[in-house]
Amino acid sequence: MIKAGAEQSRTFEDGDRQVDIVALGIVTAAILLFVATGAAIGPAVVRSLAGQGPGPDRFLVNAFVLNIAIIIFGWSRYRELCAEIRQRKAAEQHARHLAETDPLTGFLNRRSFHRAVEDMVRQAALRDRKVVLAMIDLDNFKQVNDRNGHDTGDRLLQECARRISGCLPHGALISRIGGDEFSVALEFDRDREERVDRIAASLVEAIGQSAAQNFAGADVTASIGLARSDVAFSGVAHSDDAPERRNADALLEMADIAMYHAKRQGRNSFYWFETPMADEMRFRNDLESGIRQGIAMGEFVPFYERQVDLQTGELTGFEMLARWNSPRFGVVAPDIFIPVAEEIGAIAELSEGLIARALQDALEWDARLTLSVNISPVQMRDPWFAQKLLKLLLEAAFPPQRLEIEITESCLHQNIAQVRSLIDSLKNQGIKVCLDDFGTGFSSLAMLRSLPFDRIKIDRSFVTNLAGNKDSAAIVHAIALLGQGLDLPVTAEGIENDEVLSHLRQYGPIKGQGYLYGRPRPAEQLAEWLPGVAIVAAPETVNDLAILRSQIEARRREEQALSAPASQDPQFRLA
């Protein structure tokens, strides 16, 4: 930074001299003319004052006085010109600074960072050194920004920027790429990769500390992707690009891919780019495109799982479970597409479409049967969710007392005031609210007592191992007793055999669901559960992400083998 500032200062001074030659030449000529006219009239003035001769020639006197005025005016103009030049140079320098830096953090912006990386790669190659580029994304920053306001978000970004600067060596390039994304580039010896690992680890730790120590309730961490300039990467830039241009583009893309890999691996960590990550990213892009297209085409459908009174065996209702009925990959389980839909901001549209269809299906059931629906934690942050749900109920003419909304326990620690407001709004409409996955999250008994839930649901991880695990049996029994004490009905999910069922019946009145009562089915395949409807075999659900990825890759290879016109048919494309 000091070196760059000195170079800019010399350029400024050189620019002044180039302009000053003209102004200074005029002043110099005026001074020479002043000396010449002064020498001509000086002796005559002296003789005139001594009474020894006539005074100086009037024309020369006038020229002498005029010359003095020219000198005064020229020097004044010269100083004004220098001031104008300094102001112009300062304005140009300020405009260049604004064009090349981020106003909030003072770091380089995306455009200037790209040029600086190209220069760094080129200079490092001359010294037989390599460049590492790190993409840093702040996890959960959007939630903090939405919850606490943009001023708090800006202060958090500035604090994270200060921590990032403190972890980096002299000469490193730092940029704010986007809203909550930073990028760092630095040189390193090819045999000292562990030094980069230490820097990346310190960045992860420092960013997490800055959020935890300075911003209450700001659960912000960092996901970092690393890429090195000596790793070849094909398919990033065109062959006619300059080599350094290809290096900069490749580094940015590789680091970005590695950063998203870090997010998918649990966040709050760093990963080096590896070639299989690019294939994983292409699969992810296919999945995102397929989800967006599937929402528009109505490919997401509700399946239903029976809920039964364990003491009487009577059917009490159904839980709606989302399935992706893809015409190419069959029925895809929600564990695969729900997290992706949440990340790309499509979960609200997907969920509301499913709820609307489920309400229409449930109108055909016995009026005593209830409909349970899970909502995403992302929807919990929508202040208008209760109003949107009421609109769906009105459009379907569905009785709100038959609807039960399930909220996962992990949602409660995000914003308890907003959760309470949402629950109150739902209950005011007559909708029941169930606390799902009880025992796996962070809620306390005091929170359970303070929030007006209508039911608690025991997580399947406890129920499935109930018969063979004393700890699970004790937990389930304790939750059943807790429900009785708080006058909250209890539902147990994950009942898969008669042994688990017999244990649960010992704990009092409990409603249950699980594969023992049948696997989830679409509305048109509920013959055994709803009399008068024909039964057909349910399609097999794809629950494994690796299987779905292999199917997509196989389909892509098939498409590549087809002729060009056929491969362009939208029926053959996922996205």
Image: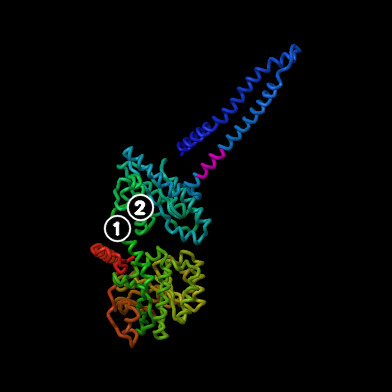
Q: Farthest residue to the top: give it.
A: 52
Residue 119 can be seen in this image: yes
Residue where numbered disc 1 is placed: 279
- Left or right of 110 in this view: 503: left
Which secondary structure dominates the residues rendered in magenta?
Answer: helix
- Choose top left, top right, bottom left or bottom right for residue 358: bottom left
Task: Tell me, yes or no, whether the highlighted magenta stretch contains residue 91.
Answer: yes
Task: Identify which residue is drawn at 35% across, 64% down.
Answer: 289
The answer to whether residue 472 of the structure is visible from this angle is no
Magenta stretch in the rendered image: 86-95
Q: Which residue is mark 2?
A: 253
Numbered tag placed on residue 167 in the rendering: none
Can you give x and y, in whole percent of width and height, for residue 160 in the image? 46, 51
Question: Is 274 drawn above or below residue 91 in the view shown?
Answer: below
Residue reaching furthest to the right = 51
How many numbered circles does the render carry? 2
Dot 2 crowding, Cα within 10 Å, few <14, some 14–19, many 20+: many
Q: Position of residue 567 (x, y in %)?
A: 28, 65
Badge 1 marks a residue whose secondary structure is helix
Res 490 → quadrant: bottom left
Which residue: 33% across, 38% down?
126
Residue 86 vs residue 441, the one in the foreground: 86
Identity of the residue furthest to the bottom in this view: 532
Q: Can residue 429 be found in the magenta stretch? A: no
